[in-house]
Image: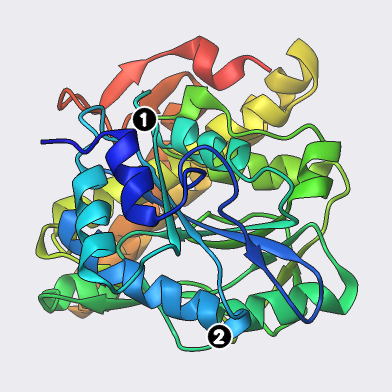
């Protein structure tokens, strides 16, 4: 049974646990911080993540709150969080909200809407685990010169070791930059946002990307295009726990295709007018074709030299190039479709501004 909001508030010991408040107050710097974790039908991950996130809040300040945004229409995470509250690890420190509209963009926007007067919103995924000083590092980097955003690295760990082909392709290797380096694109899997600056720029997550993914790529690219600054903090590491169903060749190649697809779609949204979109489409066509052909060539080298790395990396580059070409001409890869579908033809999604 799903707990009622009255039961939830009573468990929290404060009537405002769902209706307001829920900020982390930084006693040393006067900043209010919301740590936002979005979840969809991952009870085990949520149970593992929440105590760690509460511990992060406690390292920054004496007390605070983590915001859980449940994107399951059935509100399945409500009882998970309520059970944690009753059992004692997180009483009064976790705030739950239910966002029934499907799609991660809706959940991200709900997190923005629930921050109230907070200064900072820090996003982390429910299947990620932060290092001990993750939150402190992000906030310290922000305090240097108060950029619009601070981005941290994600390191993968596996529940089941990938096969040799997936490992050789380095599909789960992510970028690492020197702390203080500026970047122009990021995901919300490890991202701090200055809420006043984000609101001043009029930015929200585009719900046309709600089930395909990529609304975070678009928002951060819009942020950069509007003059906002994003700064890297290489010490603020989170660990991505990769389940067995994501270490297959099929999944990693589909993710590479989606990455290219999203890049093209966001590029078209950012383009200025019909002429601008036409020019961007030409550029994306050339870039996608070069990637696809380069991937095929590298695969060929791999077969000739019996190099597993060349074959896997070539296939990865081909998939990304194919995704770019598909996205440039209106095909959307819907990675998070809840009806099992994956690709749709939706020109308006990729070209409307």
- Residue annotated with mark 2: 59
Residue 312 drawn at (x, y percent): 25, 66
Visible residue check, residue 181: no
Name the mark on residue 211.
1
Instruction: Single out the mark in the foreground, 2 or 1.
Output: 2
- Whether 132 is drawn above or below 328: the answer is below
Residue sitting at x 46%, y 61%: 124
Kindly check if marks 2 and 1 are in contact, taking CB atoms under 8 A apart as contact.
no
Residue 255 drawn at (x, y percent): 32, 49
- Whether 144 is drawn above or below 73: the answer is below
Residue 80 drawn at (x, y percent): 20, 53
Judged left or right of residue 178, residue 336 is left
Q: Quadrant of the C terminus?
A: top right
Residue 119 drawn at (x, y percent): 75, 56
- Quarter residue 131 falls in: bottom left
SS for callout 1: loop
Visible residue check, residue 318: yes
């Amino acid at each position: 049974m799903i707990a009622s909001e009255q039961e939830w508030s009573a468990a929290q010991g404060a009537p405002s646990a769902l209706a307001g408040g829920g900020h982390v107050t930084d006693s040393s710097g006067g900043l209010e911080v919301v740590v936002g974790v979005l979840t969809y039908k991952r009870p085990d991950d949520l149970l593992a993540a929440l105590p760690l996130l509460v511990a992060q809040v406690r390292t920054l300040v004496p007390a605070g709150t983590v915001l859980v945004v449940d994107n399951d229409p059935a509100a399945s995470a409500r009882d998970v969080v309520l059970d944690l509250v009753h059992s004692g690890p997180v009483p009064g420190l976790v705030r739950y909200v239910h966002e029934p509209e499907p799609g991660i963009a809706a959940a991200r926007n709900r997190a923005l809407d629930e921050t109230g007067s907070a200064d900072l919103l820090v996003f982390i995924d429910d299947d990620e685990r932060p290092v001990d000083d993750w939150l402190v590092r992000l906030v310290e980097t922000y305090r240097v010169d108060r950029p619009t955003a601070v981005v941290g690295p994600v390191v993968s760990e596996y529940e089941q070791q990938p096969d040799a082909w997936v490992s050789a392709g380095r599909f789960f290797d992510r970028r690492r930059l020197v702390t203080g380096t500026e970047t122009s694109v990021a995901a919300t899997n490890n991202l701090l946002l200055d809420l006043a600056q984000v609101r001043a720029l009029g930015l929200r997550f585009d719900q046309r990307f709600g089930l395909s993914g990529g609304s975070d790529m678009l928002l951060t690219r819009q942020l950069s295009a509007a003059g906002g600054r994003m700064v890297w903090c290489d010490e603020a590491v989170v660990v991505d726990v990769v389940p067995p169903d994501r270490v297959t060749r099929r999944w990693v190649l589909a993710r590479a295709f989606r990455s290219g697809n999203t890049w093209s779609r966001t590029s078209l949204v950012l383009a200025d007018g019909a002429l601008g979109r036409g020019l961007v489409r030409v550029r994306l066509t050339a870039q996608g074709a070069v990637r696809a052909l380069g991937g095929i060539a590298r695969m060929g080298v791999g077969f000739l030299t019996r190099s597993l790395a060349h074959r896997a990396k070539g296939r990865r580059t081909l998939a990304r190039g194919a995704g770019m070409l598909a996205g440039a001409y209106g095909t959307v890869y819907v990675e998070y479709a809840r009806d099992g579908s994956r690709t749709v033809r939706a020109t308006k999604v990729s070209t409307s501004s």
